[in-house]
Amino acid sequence: MQVQICGAGISGSYLYMLLRDEHRVKVKEVRDTVDCVCAWGIAYRQAKELYREIGLNFDEYVLSKPKFAIANGIKFKNKNIVTFDRKSLLEELWKEIEFGQNDADIYIDATGTERALLPKIKEDKIYLTVQYLEEHEIEENVYAYARKTGYAWAFPLGDNRWHLGAGDISYERAEELIKKLREFYGFNEKNVFCSCRGKVRMLPPSKCKPFVFEKIVGVGEAIGCVSGFGEGNAPSLECAKILFENFYDRSEYEKEVLRRFKWIEIEHKLVECMQNGKKISAMLKIPRVAMIERKRSAFSLNFFKLIKI
Ligand SMILES: Cc1cc2nc3c(=O)[nH]c(=O)nc-3n(C[C@H](O)[C@H](O)[C@H](O)COP(=O)(O)OP(=O)(O)OC[C@H]3O[C@@H](n4cnc5c(N)ncnc54)[C@H](O)[C@@H]3O)c2cc1C
């Protein structure tokens, strides 16, 4: 088949590698160079296994394995989240990609928040992000500062480099959150190398339908493969793998995405309850989210710590 992938981000470039032996695949990308708009956190075991399938040694890109994740001052043991050099990894994949345009049998929308090919989502929910690359001599943990509408993060990248960022309903609010994070954990504003603005889709897959429209199939963040806490790297890779495995059966693809990302739906529901001030409903959902994160071996979350946040 002639396949046209639109978007060479994390899902599009991975899908290209999976499909290229069996199909005639080309990739259209609006950027000339790989961007670094992401905090670079990822679930290690999932990433290692998925990238192994395309012959890439993920360990070569790991930058830091933080011991703890600290949210609003509350400490959780980190079991599986690492930071990786996402830019170098994508640059390596871009060397393999044949860029260009096909008169294709199938078009893949891998354009993330843009969702450039699929019909627009009526009540889309896009959060705005701000991020800085900085230098700090602080213990390598993941630090977060959350409030009702959004949260700020600090992710260690090794060699005293850090990504400090935030996502909220406006850029101004995101900047405010970063300020709060700085005050709370002592990340003074100094040695800032660069900054960028971005977007993240805050809707689960069930609210990003259709996944398939005529000759177009969506993958990754374009169809809501991002958790309620903004984790989209491993889910987008996994989504591309699901598409590869169900390439000839689109309705099975849709079912499988909804089934495998049930956990994303639950996390979004918890976030929604917290944002709408529904404390009782939120508390009732916390044990399930704690169980999900434990099962995915990300953080050893526990109910009593979570309700404090
Ligand atoms: C600031 C920030 C920090 C984040 N931090 C994390 C994190 O630490 N861990 C985590 O798991 N997730 C994180 N995420 C989410 C994660 O980065 C995304 O969910 C993930 O990159 C989505 O992958 P994707 O392939 O679907 O889309 P992207 O990786 O966004 O790729 C989309 C690609 O499509 C291209 N494109 C856009 N429009 C067009 C068009 N019209 N034609 C052609 N190409 C187009 C873009 O240039 C881009 O290359 C973060 C997001 C943001 C904004």
Image (cartoon, rainbow, N blue to C red):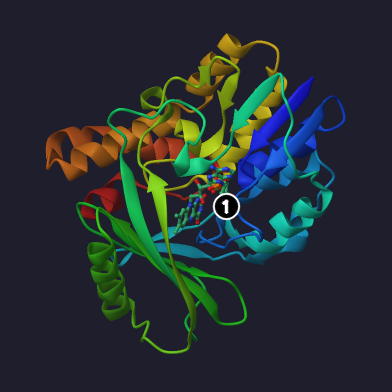
Q: Is residue 133 above or below residue 168?
A: below
Q: In this view, does 247 lie above or below 33?
A: above
- Please report the residue visible at 61 percent of the width from the left and 55 percent of the height from the top: 31
Report x, y in % for residue 74. 32, 63
> Where does label 1 land, which residue?
42
Tell me the quadrant of the picture where the N terminus can be found.
top right
Report x, y in % for residue 80. 57, 52
202 left or right of 67? Answer: left
226 left or right of 173? Answer: right
- Please report the residue visible at 65 percent of the width from the left and 10 percent of the height from the top: 249
303 left or right of 199? Answer: left
Q: Is mark 1 on a helix, strand or loop?
A: strand
Report x, y in % for residue 13. 70, 43
Tell me the quadrant of the picture where the C terminus can be found.
bottom left
Q: Which of 148 and 76 is in front in this view?
A: 148
Q: Is residue 81 above or below residue 296?
A: below
Q: Can residue 56 be seen in this view?
A: yes
The part of the image, by quadrant, that contains residue 145 is bottom left
- Establish whether ligand 1 lies closer than 8 Å to the Cβ of label 1: yes
66 left or right of 33? Answer: left
- Please report the residue visible at 33 percent of the width from the left and 36 percent of the height from the top: 268
Report x, y in % for residue 49. 73, 41
The part of the image, by quadrant, that contains residue 26 is top right
